[in-house]
Amino acid sequence: MGAILTLVEPVVVINKLGTSFFDMALTQTVYNQSLKATAGDSDRAQTLSSHFLLIQSVLSSVAAMLSIIPLSRMADRHGPKVFLVASQMGSVLGMFTLVIFMYCEVPLEFLYLGSLLHGLSGGGPMFWAGVAALASLSSEQGKRTLKLNIVDFCFGVAGVVGGLLSGYLYQMGPSILLLTAILVSVVALLYSVFALTDSRRSLSESEPLLAESENGKTMDRVSVGMLMSTMVLFMLGMVGAENVLQLYVLKPPLSWDSIWAGYGRAATSTMYLSSFIGVLGLFKVLGDTALTLLGIVSNCTGMAIMAFTVESWVYFLARGIMMFACVPMPTLRAMLSKNLHPQQYGRVFGLLQLVLAVTDLLSNVFFTSIYPLTLGWFSGFCFLLSCAITLHMVFYCYSKYVFLLCVILNKPPLKKDWLFVQSFYSQVG
């Protein structure tokens, strides 16, 4: 029983269910209010909704940046569990602002207060910093990639269930969906506070850091810097486009209702399941490096197809091609943890999430600013741009990491790692 209480996966599953329900309620509420304000004009409603969600994202990200440093110091003293508890408290408080909006005569801008509360408590960045730190502390170095992909697998399962149920719950009534989201999120918070335990493993002599060598300190800085840069560039190209996609499916020619929007969210979350299956089957064959690059190719190919989506089946085809799209981030986090001492997890993962929060903000500002400008001529342009940014910038950065890894350790490149990069560049020039 004690071993079960050290697992962070139950928190991830319950929290994802709650946030899936809330995201559906929030998106539908904002879009419906925008339709009313524009007398049913879908293009203008799309523009208003994207601007509102952009401001909301900016407020949440900026507030999260302000809270990361004090929360990281608390985590150094009390453990990374602080990240989980603080961020979930802010999430629950933020959900109550939507309740007030539904039952009281307040303007739509009142919902910005919920974003501020969520951000000041750490928001999503701190939640995932805590998840990554606790998962790394409770796993052996050789199994860490698999461990972090299991966490993402659980996240995906919960996302599929939440996506499928959210549409039907919304049909029963927006208030039912929202109250369910709050109840589920409270359960996740209570589990984190009273049930989850912080299990710390000591780094054994048989598990040296990946960066240890004659130039260990240099290698540590180079590898950590390059891995973090790869994650930043990957998020820069993909996060904003994914957020735009949530609005894209609501307008013609797709014109999805809440049921179809739920199916779309479920299909998105299914990528976590297929990515986990891919890691299980290919990890020993390809290794961390090639797995990450495979995931990047899968993500970008699907996003390019998404740009030409005019029927629902094309959307789901693109999601199928993106089957390995969720491999890169957990695998890169696992590689990063292998270059760190366990005592550094809280501080470094907190710093990483600070950088990713800035990246998330920039990506959302960039894509949500471009999207309204393309509605009149090619609304799928954002997805092609996302593909181009991610594919070339991330492959360049990641190939440099592989090269420097080999040079500093004075070892030739591993065939399964380096040939994958070479074969890519031989095709795209």
Image (spheres, rainbow, N blue to C red):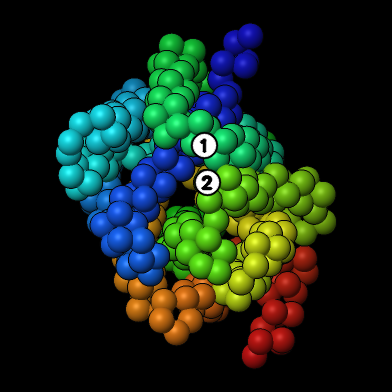
- Amino acid bearing label 1: Gln
Image height check: is 111 above or below 278? above
Amino acid tagged 2: Ser
- Write down the quadrant of residue 349 in the picture: top left
> What residue is rendered at 31% in x and 50% in y?
33
The N terminus appears in which quarter of the rendering?
A: top right
Q: In this view, does 287 lie to the left or right of 64?
A: right
Q: Distance between the residues labelled 2 and 1?
A: 7 Å
The structure residue drawn at horizontal position 32% and vertical position 71%, both measured from the top left corner, is 369
Tags 2 and 1 touching, CB below 8 Å: yes
In this view, the residue in front, 10 or 135, is 10
Question: Quick one: 93 or 249, which is closer to the camera?
Answer: 249
User: Which residue is at 36% across, 66% downward?
Assistant: 41
Q: Earlier in the sequence, mark 2 or mark 1?
A: 1
Residue at 26% over, 57% down: 37
Rendering quarter of residue 95:
top left
Say if 1 sits above or below 202 in the image. above
138 sits left or right of 423 in the view: left
Counting from the top left corner in percent of width and height, residue 73 is at 27, 34
| Residue linked to disc 2 | 258
Name the residue tied to disc 1.
Answer: 171
Against 426, is 209 above or below? above
Can you tell which quarter of the image residue 377 is in?
bottom left
Which element is circle 1 on? helix
Q: Residue furthest bottom?
A: 429
Image spot of residue 333 (x, y percent): 54, 49
Q: In which quarter of the image is the C terminus?
A: bottom right
Q: Residue 63 carries which label?
A: none
Crowding near pointer 2: few (<14 within 10 Å), some, many (20+)?
Answer: many
